[in-house]
Image (tube, coloured by chain):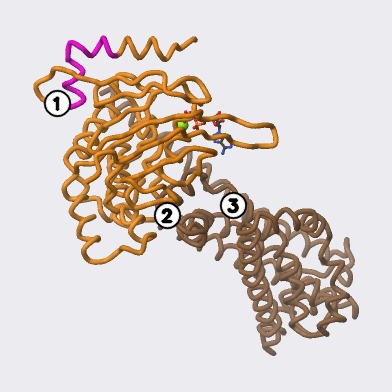
Amino acid sequence: MVDKVVELKNVSMNYHTLSGETKAIRNLSLDINNGEFVSIVGPSGCGKSTLLSLISGILKPTSGSILVNGEPVTGPSSNLGYMLQKDHLFGWRTIIKNATLGLEIQKKLNKKSQAYVEHLLDEYGLADFKHHYPKQLSGGMRQRAALIRTLATNPDILLLDEPFSALDYQTRLAISEEIWLIIKKERKTAIFVTHDIAEAVASSDRIIVLTQRPAEIKNIHEIHLTCNIKTPISCREAPEFRHYFNEIWKELDVHV
Amino acid sequence: MYSNEISKEHQAYIKKYKVRRTSIAVSQISLLVLFFALWEIAAYFKWIDPFIMSQPSRVFKTLVKLTADGSIFTHTGITIFETIVGFLSGTILGTIIAIILWWSDFVAKVLDPYLVVLNALPKTALGPIILVWIGGTASSIIAMALLISIIVTILNVYLAFESCDEDKVKLLWTLGATKSQVLTKVVLPSSIPSIISVLKINVGLSLVGVIVGEFLVSKAGLGYLIIYGGQVFKMDLVMTSVLILAVAAALMYLSVAWFEKKLNKMR
Ligand SMILES: Nc1ncnc2c1ncn2[C@@H]1O[C@H](COP(=O)(O)OP(=O)(O)O)[C@@H](O)[C@H]1O
Ligand SMILES: [Mg+2]
């Protein structure tokens, strides 16, 4: 198994529109290791979503190279799973039909993969909701269903783009804990974009702080929290938590 | 005690609502009865000329006569058939063209001004041309109905396709979907409500096309009865046909609305 699962080398990305050129990412190099949980924080509009789109292969960088599992990225690959801001479950499909969407698209829907999705739904508390429609589920359950849709194609690397930002604070705290546990249990590598510093510190092995647009790496923090049970909620009690939080807060340099 | 008071208040609210609903229904029916009664009386006392304005009792007699010889069923059936074929083919063809526009942004941009002009053009003006090209048959009438509904369908369905949630489309790209998968898995299903509401508009539009077509072709259908009745000054026939047309139009609209409701319940 490759140790570096994602490698970005001198990646730059410019958008072109009639109103002008937007430099979103400038000369960014970054490695992500197998099994790591890495958070990316940065001012809004700095290029975080762009970065994930580049890694996922739905966008091509203007310059530089991106490798996933040692191979250059040429387009969307089933090694990567993408989770967006909202759950985007389709209202006209049942939960199980939503969860198998990726398999259906990649023409990998068979007895075995169907059984795997059923297993995931059972395992993560959606057993009784398989044949329900998304609007019959709570926000937290929908987010879990969206994660299962992402896990269904069995990717090694998950790209999460502010996946909880549409939820209220209470639900968000609970669901981010749950999803963190699922990601760890399924032994996935996670690249997690968030604007919530506390969430990032509590759940990550490493935090990448980006600059204003065009995004460059401002700093990288290795997070070591002393807590008995290592889960995001209990890690919020760790003595080092405030220290990391304040450091990153200062680096983000938010002016209101 | 307190909750009891609330429930009384709520009962009063429900009662008030029901009374209001009943009084609306009663007023609606009374208005219709009053209209026909006034019309009958006015004609009876010769305040209006029943030869020109017709009269409910004469309309009723005509209706009985047309039912007896069965011609009413033939003509109504033909009009309904042409309308249904017209609006279904208008909706289906329009949707197919909208898919082509969605598929190729270039084609959409090129055709945009033509669609705008065609949409603004009163399609009935093309009636005589269709008559000459296709001939005085039911095909001409259906073509007329199709022509009237297709442009609106293209514009509305294309708009629905374009307003499909960008992130849902992005989700499909990240899963490695092809363009035709994006179309069939997200864009089409999320546009179904818009397509159904277009169907509802098209019932009315296509009926306009059919009636104009029947005026021109003058062989059969309610439109033919109306134009024929007008030409030979049989106003009873004209009024009867118009009334039947109103009922048929309402029934067709209501069945599409019912279908829409059924479909929305499923989603
Ligand atoms: N498709 C696009 N075309 C042009 N500009 C874009 C496009 N997508 C994003 N941008 C611009 O690139 C910058 C970075 O966007 P994004 O990656 O979404 O930021 P973030 O996720 O950090 O908020 C923003 O200024 C945004 O306006
Ligand atoms: Mg973003």
The response on whether ligand 1 sits within 8 Å of label 2 is: no
Magenta residue check for A243: yes
Looking at the picture, which amino acid does disc 1 mark?
Answer: Lys
Residue matched to label 3: B160
Chain letter behind tag 1: A
Q: Secondary structure beneath disc 3?
A: helix
- Depth order, front residue of A228/B67: A228
Residue matched to label 1: A230
Residue B82 position within the rendered picture, expressed as x and y whole percent measured from the top left: 68, 77
Q: Secondary structure beneath disc 2?
A: loop
Q: Secondary structure beneath disc 1?
A: loop
Question: Which segment did they paint magenta?
Answer: A230-244
Question: In the rendered picture, chain B carries what hue?
Answer: brown
Say which mark, if any, is on residue B80. Answer: none
Q: Is residue A248 left or right of residue B63?
A: left
- Depth order, front residue of A197/B37: A197
The response on whether ligand 2 sits within 8 Å of label 1 is: no
Say which mark, if any, is on residue B176. Answer: 2
